[in-house]
Image (cartoon, helix red, strand yellow):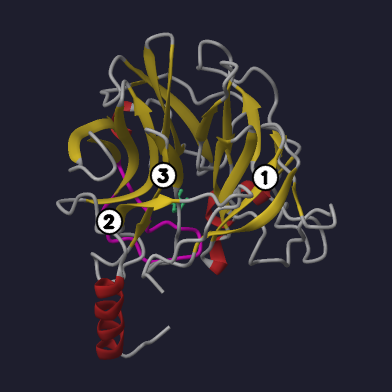
Amino acid sequence: PPTDEKTLSEDLRDLAERAISQPLVTHIYTADPSAHVFDGKLYVYCSHDIEGGVAFNDNGDHFCMEDYHVLSMDSPQGEASDRGVALHVDDVPWAERQMWAPDAAHRNGHYYLYFPAKAADGLFRIGVAVGEHPAGPFKAQPQPIAGTYSIDPSVFADDDGEQYLLFGGIWGGQLQKYRDNAYAAAHEEPADDEPALGPRIARLRADMLELDEPTRELQILDEHGQPLRARDHNRRYFEGPWLHKYEGRYYLSYSTGNTHLLCYAVGDNPYGPFTYQGQVLRPVVGWTTHHSICDFEGRWYLFYHDSLLSGGVTHLRSIKVAELHHDAQGRIVPIDPYGV
Ligand code: FUB
């Protein structure tokens, strides 16, 4: 990346001119959008990025967010309205810091906000908070969800009424510290020629407050039916799992992290296995890339973020939306955020 300030700002100016979408809101920094349609309206559950003065490190400590805001929109082309603070870390009995990417779900007339945060022991866990309106406020359960760990929860609601919690992210997200749902400080990422780690999934209990089963790993296979290897940084799973269903098939999309791509893989049921298909979004300005895919009135939309508004500051991001297309074979047409 350019280090000369003048070059950097010229590059960013050029990208800003070519950007295919503008931030949904500019009065606060927002990231990690999880979009859903509830009662015919779009709700976007997002991280609320702040400048906390914590030095940048590989652990992601500079992502020191404290609360969640919900945005609502009448349509993907409409104005986004900030519905205010939906949940603050001070109101979560078990959580100490770092309110990272959330998601939400609806069942039995209630709304559920799923979120990761670090507890006092420095480990991420996933909590759930309950509300009576899609925009909150939400009241956190006293304990994190048993059997959860790591980051980036997302909830997939299948047509048969079952709902599933997915989660997991490596590096600062700590997924590499777990094998078969058990933590060990000595665990690290698999060696280059070993299968890469996958996200975790478990069906949620009907009350949406607990897992109905232990989590299992989602496998992502290459074109030969072999698991993607840890060295395959352009395709292997890093963080930000999202499931959507298109014409009866299950699409698992995710970030590759250090290669800054959003990719996807397709399977025949929520548990996989999934076969790698291609890219969804080319790299954005900023280190992280994180998304959701949402159907609104028969058209598909990609919600994502970049760091253009903050001049490239990686932990000060802004949510955007772009229409997403599946071709006649059901393949996602990759999007370039800067229109090349
Ligand atoms: O927002 C903090 C972290 O950055 C998220 O949990 C990751 O997915 C990445 O976007």
Nearest-to-viewer mark from 3 and 1: 1
Residue 204 lies, with reference to residue 19, above or below; the image says above
Residue 232 lies, with reference to residue 318, above or below; the image says below
What range is drawn magenta here? 49-66
Residue 58 lies, with reference to residue 145, above or below; the image says below
Task: Determine the CA span between mark 1 and mark 2.
Answer: 39 Å
Q: What residue is disc 2 on?
A: 52
Task: Determine the CA span between mark 3 and mark 2.
Answer: 14 Å
Q: Secondary structure at mark 3?
A: loop
Under mark 1, the amino acid is Val
- Residue 329 is labelled as none
Q: What residue is disc 3 on?
A: 100
Task: Determine the CA span between mark 3 and mark 1.
Answer: 26 Å
Q: Is the CB of the residue bearing disc 3 within 8 angstroms of ligand 1? A: yes
Name the residue: 50% across, 44% down.
122
- Predominant SS of the magenta segment: loop
Which residue is nearer to you in this view: 73 or 50? Answer: 73
Under mark 3, the amino acid is Trp
Name the residue: 30% across, 42% down.
66
Horizontal and vertical percent position of residue 330? 61, 47
Horizontal and vertical percent position of residue 303? 38, 48
Residue at the left extreme?
27
Under mark 2, the amino acid is Gly
| Magenta stretch: includes residue 57 | yes
- Which image quarter holds the N terminus? bottom left
Mark 2 Cα shell of 10 Å, populated few (<14), some (14-19), many (≥20) = few
Of the numbered discs 1 and 2, the one sitting upstream in the chain is 2
| Magenta stretch: includes residue 93 | no
Mark 1 Cα shell of 10 Å, populated few (<14), some (14-19), many (≥20) = many
Residue 69 lies, with reference to residue 318, above or below; the image says above
Contact (CB < 8 A) between labels 1 and 2? no
Q: What residue is disc 1 on?
A: 266
